[in-house]
Amino acid sequence: MPRRPSLCLALLLLFSLPHAVLADFSLDLPDGERLDVRVWGEDNTGPLFVWLINQYGETEGPHNLARRLAERNATVWQVDLLDSLLLQRSNEVVRNLDGAPVAALLHEAVDSGRGPIVVTTCDRMTVPLLRGLRAWQEEATDMNAVAGGILFFPNLYRGTPVAGEEPELLGIVSATNMPLAILQPELGTNRPRLEALLATLHRAGSPAYGWLVDSVRDYYLLRSVEPEAVELEAMGGPIPFDVTRAILDTPTQLLAATRLLAQTPRPDRPAPLDEEAEAPVLPAFGLVERPAYDPPGYDLVDARGVRHQHTESLGRVTLVNFWATWCPPCVHEIPSMNRLAAAYPEDEFAIVSINFRESPAHVLNFMEDVNVDFPVLMDEDGAVSGEWRVFAFPSSFLLDRQGRVRYSVNTAIEWDTDEVREVIDRLRAEDTY
């Protein structure tokens, strides 16, 4: 345990740093809108980070990172696009944001004479970031004036697909050829898709780089003892050791990525954009009927050490549910799943849940507080979730008595409803052959 004393001291410093020099300003946009910009390290001479606040609003984590960057001679412009533009904080709004506001910020950054200039953000806000980079390219006179973008756990997909189908990347990904650095949490939901994302960017001409952030999940930068946003409640409570270490490493990673991007050649023109591929995909709600197909199956040990295989589902209707304890909707639907399981004989209907990349000890501890009346299988490396093409949590699949997928759900629902029971009863009544 020799590293803990120094880490604890660093953590104390992290949350007690003196405020860097602040000099806020507003940027008027051509359409009459205005962006409010908070500046950290105004008098510094190092790189300039244009930081887009995440879709859930300001949190203390990014502010602390901005302070620490300012302590290392960087300047940070933090902008909450949704707040400045009076837009709703929703996935759909973020996916529909155009790049004009970000492009205006980049023009202002270039005019400031600072550099190198990098734009950074996380999650779905990476969509307007890429659109802004491309919009800036279309108007720029010097393509080398902006070094590129740094993306934390990006979500660049058109929307949540029907459970069991692969998500589609938005068209802007195939139209991005500026240098990018992607910092992907090792335990993040989209970790298995990082290589495909990088390949798409490379085909577009982007010299994109990818780094794995060890032992953390998505949203680690937004961890807080008492989150202000309801959507981040699952990120609350004591901050784990690995998250603290990753947060403390982030300024060094940002500065190193900036140096790399600044040395990377930039294109002389933007890549072509497929406008049709920019249209978001609307989410599918509730039970979605699927053409019958054989799923990849599973052979996993549950939290108590008992092995379970997909063949156990043969002869009875089975609900296979993919979930995680850090997912509030997943936890919310457990009681209704318990009630649904209790309504049928075990040889007629069963529920099997598959936990995504958590440890048996953690799940058993969770089950001391939350009653779970069905087996919890441990997908500790996420391989089974990937084979089933799970994109969002929770995702569920309703199997017929032949073990084939007949319905899927990509959101949390109330499971003990007449609608669900009618579907289960219909599948129970079908002939096995």
Image (cartoon, rainbow, N blue to C red):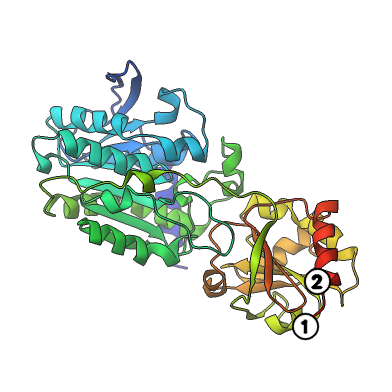
Decide: is 347 above or below 66.
below
Left or right? Give the position of 232 relative to 112.
right
Towards the viewer: 265 or 171? 171
The disc at residue 433 is 1
- Few, some or many residues within 10 Å of mark 1 (<14, 14–19, 20+): few
Is residue 385 in view? yes
Secondary structure beneath label 1:
loop
User: The residue under label 1 is which amino acid type?
Assistant: Tyr
Secondary structure beneath label 2:
strand
Decide: is 131 above or below 271.
above
Q: Earlier in the sequence, mark 1 or mark 2?
A: 2
- Provide residue 299's location: percent of width, then percent of height: 64, 82
Residue under the point 13% across and 50% down? 266
Residue ID for mark 2: 350
- Provide residue 365's location: percent of width, then percent of height: 71, 64
**Is label 1 or label 2 in front?**
1
